[in-house]
Image (cartoon, rainbow, N blue to C red):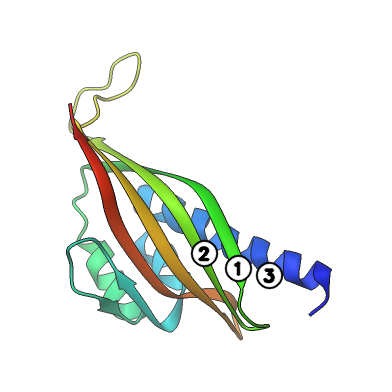
Amino acid sequence: MDELERMLAREACRELVLQAALHVDANRPEQFAALFAEDGVLTRPNAQPLRGREAILAAYRQRPADRITRHLVTNTLVTLESDTEARAASYVLLWSGSADAEPGAQGRPAHPRRMVGEFDDRFVLTAEGWRIARREARFVLHLEA
């Protein structure tokens, strides 16, 4: 892989991290699950691993319809491990609220709990392009307002 190909691979993986946050926040479980390899694994904080796209899709389809989240993802550092494998570390600030709350001039009120977490992602190059092979999400800090 030449340097341009390496840059493009890192950018494709970084884009997956951002797309994942966008699809979860927009409540698009099909698009979120499609970012994973067919046999991808997702481990959420304090939960059993979800193995495979179908398990990920089924879990995210159960998300409460009134839940609003915003994952603010930053400091994503992608490291290529080979021509077909990469990893990334990201910091995440999670805000949440309820669509049932009355919106005001500044939007809806946020829930009092704010969470700081991390994503530890592993990527693999597939026939579909780069996909998430494994994601481990964990909380590191929280604030109860």
- Residue underneath mark 2: 88
Q: Amino acid at mark 2?
A: Ala
Q: Earlier in the sequence, mark 2 or mark 3?
A: 3
**Residue 78 placed where, x, y %?**
59, 63
Asked if residue 82 lies left or right of residue 35, the reply is right
Residue for point 34% across, 13% down:
105
Residue placed most toward the observer, 74 or 140:
140
Residue placed most toward the observer, 35 or 71:
71
**Disc 2 vs disc 1: Cβ atoms closer than 8 Å?**
yes
- Inter-mark Cα distance, 3 to 1: 10 Å
**Disc 2 vs disc 3: Cβ atoms closer than 8 Å?**
no
Asked if residue 114 lies left or right of residue 7, the reply is left
**Disc 3 vs disc 1: Cβ atoms closer than 8 Å?**
no
Residue for point 18% across, 67% down:
47
- Residue underneath mark 1: 79
Residue for point 40% across, 59% down:
119
Q: Amino acid at mark 1?
A: Thr
